[in-house]
Image (cartoon, rainbow, N blue to C red):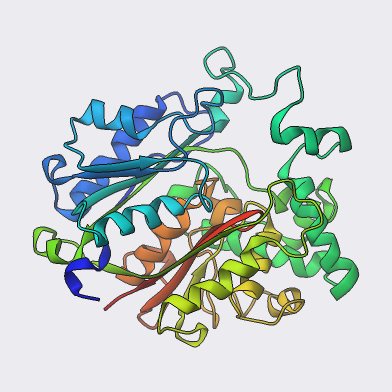
Amino acid sequence: MSIARETYVTGLGLSEVGVRLTRPPLLLTVDAIKEALADAGLTIDQIDGVSTYPGKSQGYTQFSPVGADELIEVLGINAKWYAGGGEVSSQLAALVAAAGAIRLGQARHVICFRTVYEAAALVRPEEYPSRFQPRVDGVQQWFLPFNAFSAANWIGQYAMRHVKKYGMTREQLAQIALTDSANAILNPRAAAITKKQLTMDDYMSSRMISSPFCLYDCDRFTDCSTVLILSAGDALGEVKSTPIRLAGMAGTANRHNWDQEEWVAAYTTGKELWKHTDYTVDDVDTVQLYDGFSFNAVTWLEGLGFCPVGEGSRFIEGGSRIARDGELPLNTNGGQLGAGRQHGFGFAHEAVSQLRGEAGPRQIPNNPKVAVATSGGGPLATALLFAKD
């Protein structure tokens, strides 16, 4: 492919990350965009595209309080292309859509953003009503009658399969949470989420949520906005940052009712990613893997081919292999367990930061050049491959 149609990440932005913030979500989004524009050396007048997931959700605004339409209006963006939808292969599909627009010549610089306001909404229900209604209908009709109220229950059933079939132990699974916590301590923007480093005793003594998950296996509601600016290859002369190429993309979807699925979508997406790039697992220097629940990261390690199916728990056993100075550093910003629920976008942000060498105290050694970032992994999954050319 001509460099003119290649897609690069040229700007990174992250708002304040907190719990029960009072700053409105639209302003958090603007904060992150300003940071991303300054990082890229661009102005808002140069932006001609906007992409987000899942667009503004009118009935569930805490989950997605800011849409592309609203942002275009507020910032006066001259958008030649924009998108925002939930029926895609998870959160990072917003970057896939933007890359497609760039490759077709429909846009040159696209703001991709994800804003969440779930922690603040819990204490301000009059402004952000709950999505739960007295009547059970839609997709919830397949879950609630069986007391499967949360994705912790849904992902938990797959984790229990690994416990029963492959012998995964809680001590092994704990390594995802422990690794995330150790990395989060080095991340200043995780300070509101992780205040002290998690220990194995903390983990093993915490209350159970949905077997085999305990409290520390579950990410927590967070308020923040994350932004990445994607640019066309022939527009790199307009930016001042170190561009990181989006070298591969994949996304798949399974049935949303979770009924009788053999494997979650991380397995099919992981295989699909390598069909669209010349890179292999042996080229990857770091992985930023979705961990809405700790077991999600295990399925991604298996699905992407870093270890065989059923061997993920042994791959992470002891934590040394996935530590920041290990052979495959994982979730170096703290992941969603340690740095807050940035809903997938935080992983792409961190992958680019590491490849640029701009991750500060949490920077991994040996000049990393290739990284994988993922989102979802249950019925929906997206995987992105980033490369420093």
Task: Where is residue 30? Give x, y as percent.
Answer: 29, 34
Which image quarter is the C terminus in? bottom left
Q: Where residue 110 sits in the image (x, y, percent)? A: 25, 49
Query: Image quarter for residue 359?
Result: bottom left
Q: Identify the residue at the far bottom of this view.
A: 282
In the displayed structure image, the side of residue 128 where residue 139 appears, left or right: right
127 lies above or below 65: above
**What's the residue at 32%, 59% (across, down)?**
99
Find the residue positioned furthest to the left. Answer: 237
**Is 283 above or below relative to 3?**
below
Front in this rendered view, residue 242 or 359: 242
Residue 50 in percent (x, y) is at: 29, 43
Say if 134 sits above or below 360 in the image: above
Seen from the viewer's position, the closer of residues 100 and 234 is: 100
Q: Could you say which is closer to the camera, residue 240 or residue 50?
A: 50
Q: Does the image show residue 368?
A: yes
Residue 216 in the image, given as x and y percentages of width and height: 71, 51
What residue is at 67 percent from the left and 67 percent from the top?
Answer: 299
Instruction: Single out the residue that lies furthest toward the top.
Output: 126
Q: Is residue 323 visible?
A: no
Q: Nearer the viewer, residue 27 or 386?
A: 386
Task: Classify residue 376 as left or right of residue 74.
Answer: right
Quick one: quadrant of the N terminus? bottom left
**Residue drawn 21% across and 39% down?**
79
Instruction: Specify whether 341 is left or right of 160.
Output: left
Count of marks placed on residues: 0
Q: Quadrant of residue 10?
A: bottom left
